Image (cartoon, grey):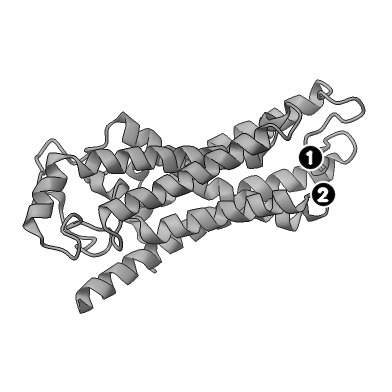
Amino acid sequence: MCLGLEDIHPKNFQLRFPFLRAFSTSPWLPILVFIFYRLAVGLFCLAWLIVSFFQTDGKWFLYISNWIFLSIAIYFIVGTLLSIAYSCSDEAKYLSKMKSTRWGAEPYIEGFSGDEMPARNQPHWSQEQDDRLTLPYKVFWIVFTIASVGSLQVTLIYLLIFQKNIDTTDASLVIMNSVFVTVELLISNIPVILLHFFYSHVFQSIYILFTFIYWAIGGTSEGKSYIYRALDYGEDPAWACIIVFLYLVIFQIFAHLYCYLLFTFRKWLVRNWYAKN
């Protein structure tokens, strides 16, 4: 993988993409199988969230692991709806009739058609459609970035820093986060943009600010003004600052690069698979 100036161009902060089907299809699975896969994962996450909500004594919203798992559930449920909507669209029906690919409905897939292929060579393209993403798709992309990067951050911080303070259920939760994200990155067509780390960074920074405010006002539990012991800003502020730095900078950079590398690996796999078949 070679990074170029194009990868870090300021325009890549924007949520722009010319193909809706990149967010609604898979390079490996028929559209119906892909829909059922997203639906199954979304319902599983939703069921887990409901159970965990009633086991946390009204403090469910304090923990970043729950927020990240919620974002994953939202991503898969909304992704299911977008995939269903796309499968019923005129574009999908038109492309299916073309039968130009393995499954007949995904002629454009990240890394197969060629990274240099201009949008104007694609069906259903017009001069005004260099960015075809409507607001729901843009929000969906932001949620994906928050969920994918955040899940890996949470897994790292829990297993490397908080491991002595988590039970089997919590450990399973944070590991499942990363498993779901890894699978989605490998079997979906969704793109990953390097500069989109900004969106997850803003979300995580707001949460860290919340942990500080929560501690500053004394928390909600008698004798416990912090959410996580490692973020007890009063008892050991230096250690808390180190944790914040690790979480917001080191772990986040690692997590986003992991997602981008998986995206690049998927493009390579797709290119080589379809070239041989």
Asked if residue 231 can be seen in this view, the reply is: yes
Q: Which of marks 2 and 1 is in front?
A: 2
- Identify the mark at residue 178; answer none if there is no mark: none
Q: Is mark 1 on a helix, strand or loop?
A: loop
Between the C-alphas of marks 2 and 1, the distance is 9 Å
In the depicted structure, whether residue 130 falls above or below residue 223: below
Side (left or right) of 271 relative to 160: left
In the depicted structure, whether residue 22 falls above or below residue 128: below
- Identify the mark at residue 228; answer none if there is no mark: 1
Q: Which amino acid does label 2 sit on?
A: Asn
In percent of width and height, residue 269 lies at: 33, 71
Binning the other alpha carbons within 10 Å of mark 1 as few (below 14), some (14 to 19) or many (20 upward) gives some
Depth check, front residue: 80 or 274: 80
Depth check, front residue: 186 or 54: 54
Q: Which residue is drawn at 74% across and 30% down?
A: 212
- Along the polypeptide, which appears first: circle 2 or circle 1? 2
Q: Which residue is drawn at 33% across and 53% down?
A: 34
Is the C-beta separation of discs 2 and 1 under 8 Å? yes
Residue 277 figure quarter: bottom left
Residue 68 figure quarter: top right
Instruction: Look at mark 2 in the image and give the residue it sits on.
Output: 165
Side (left or right) of 71 relative to 17: right
Q: Is mark 2 on a helix, strand or loop?
A: helix
In percent of width and height, residue 225 lies at: 85, 29
Binning the other alpha carbons within 10 Å of mark 2 as few (below 14), some (14 to 19) or many (20 upward) gives few
